[in-house]
Image (cartoon, rainbow, N blue to C red):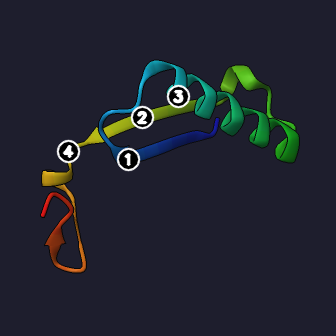
Amino acid sequence: MPVVRVTWFEGKDTQTKKAVAAEITESIVRNTGTDPKYIYVIFEDVAPSDWAGEGKLFSE
């Protein structure tokens, strides 16, 4: 049962999430033969003020 977690900056619309979920699912099915009913995609929307890289908040 593959579970894929996508963490990205908040603000993506539902259509974008649907498209990304479909492509991730299709890739796993194509490459592993897993039944799509057992593939899960979880989206985590994070504010740039809650995420840092290179020691700096992305909101800066």
Report the residue at 67% width, 39% height from top.
24
Q: What's the CA distance linking mark 1 and mark 3?
A: 12 Å
**Residue identifier under label 3:** 16
- Disc 2/disc 3 C-alpha distance (Å): 11 Å
Residue 48: x and y in percent read 20, 52
Marks 2 and 1 close (CB-CB < 8 Å): yes
Ranked by sequence position, the earlier of labels 4 and 1 is 1
Mark 1 or mark 3: whose residue is earlier in sequence: 1
In space, the residues marked 3 and 4 are separated at their CA atoms by: 17 Å
Which of labels 4 and 2 is toward the front?
A: 4
**Dividing the picture into quarters, in which one does residue 28 lie?**
top right
Q: Kindly identify the amino acid type of the residue bearing the numbered disc 3.
A: Thr
Q: Amino acid at mark 1?
A: Trp
User: For the residue marked with disc 2, what is the amino acid?
Assistant: Phe
Which residue is labeled 2 in the image? 43
Mark 4 and mark 2: Cα distance apart in space: 13 Å
**Which mark is first along the chain, 4 or 3?**
3
List the residue tagged with mark 4: 47
Q: How far apart are the alpha carbons under marks 4 and 1?
A: 9 Å
Q: Residue at x 39, y 47 (%)?
A: 7
> Callout 3: helix, strand or loop?
helix
In the rendered image, the vertical position of residue 16 relative to residue 31, given as above or below: above
Between disc 1 and disc 3, the foreground one is 3
Q: Which mark is residue 8?
A: 1
Residue positioned 85% across, 47% down in the render: 31
- In the rendered image, residue 52, in percent from the top left (x then y), is placed at 20, 66
Q: Secondary structure at mark 2?
A: strand
Q: Badge 4: how crowded within 10 Å, few (<14), some, or many (20+)?
A: some
**58 relative to 5 in the view: left or right:** left
